[in-house]
Amino acid sequence: MMQKILTHHSLPRPAALLARMAGLSLIAALFVGLPATGSQAASADTVRSLYGDRIEFGIYRNGSPVGTHEVRFKEQDGNLRVQTEFDLSVSALFITLFRLEYQSDAVWRDGKLVELQARTDRNGTIANVQAQAEGELLKVEGPNGPYQAELGVFPTNHWNAGVVGSQQVLNTITGRIADVRLVPVGVEQVDTAHGVIDATRYRYEGAIQNEVWYDSNGRWVQMRFFGEDGSSVELRCRKCKPTETAEASF
């Protein structure tokens, strides 16, 4: 969900580590093991079979918990409604050094994003992005002015594995359209609260640089990026299957 909010030089050190969160999405000549297309992955029935009614992740920096990420799904008037909340706080000696809160509310129709409202609060600085389908275009308003993209562009949210076939994504913090690509690295074992899951790791390149893992069904199970000081920030699955939230061992 996260992409660069400001330049890394304008952020305090902990924020710079987290500014790479943005990214999500890509291009893929090889989409090994992921059978869902963008349209399939955005249908209410497919999402329910993959995730149930929600996804829950813990956010960790160098192994220490710093926040939570939740995505909720429901069918509404024949469309898929997706609501996202991201809450991250970095503290030291009981002082909050950096706080990032993000909420978005999106509507998908026939496998395409047709409406979006997103709000980001970064240490009290608010950014809003709105997107609305008009004909074959998605009209976007955000902190960087108006943009437009072809209808079907994916927003920077990880849950929809269909994004792997894309060459551009919508940054839901800045409102910009970003050129991206994804390189498959290989199948690895990922520790989740549901147990160990085999998943393919993809490395993002281009405007976004991070890593994301999808299992053979196209289910998002992990994400990782590295800060400028080498710190590792990970999103670890607490609930990424259609079951109740499992007890995490991490």
Image: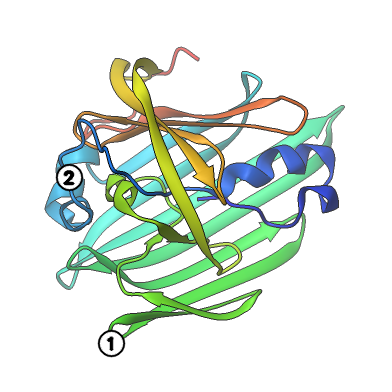
Count neighbours of disc 1 (C-alpha within 10 A) and say few if under 14, some if 14 to 19, many if 20 or more: few
User: Is 164 or 217 nearer to us in this picture?
Assistant: 164
Q: Position of residue 3 (x, y in %)?
A: 59, 52
Check the image and report above or below for 238 versus 47. above
Q: Position of residue 96 (x, y in %)?
A: 81, 40
User: Is 107 or 68 nearer to us in this picture?
Assistant: 107
Q: Secondary structure at mark 2?
A: loop
User: Is 181 or 232 nearer to us in this picture?
Assistant: 181
**Lower sequence index among marks 2 and 1:** 2
- Disc 2 target residue: 36
- The image quadrant that residue 128 belongs to is bottom right
Q: Amino acid at mark 2?
A: Ala
User: Which numbered disc covers residue 135?
Assistant: 1
Q: Residue at x 26, y 46 (%)?
A: 53
Q: Amino acid at mark 1?
A: Gly
Q: Secondary structure at mark 1?
A: loop
Q: Position of residue 146 (x, y in %)?
A: 56, 82
Q: Residue at x 41, y 75 (%)?
A: 149
Q: Residue at x 42, y 49 (%)?
A: 25
* Count of numbered circles on the image: 2
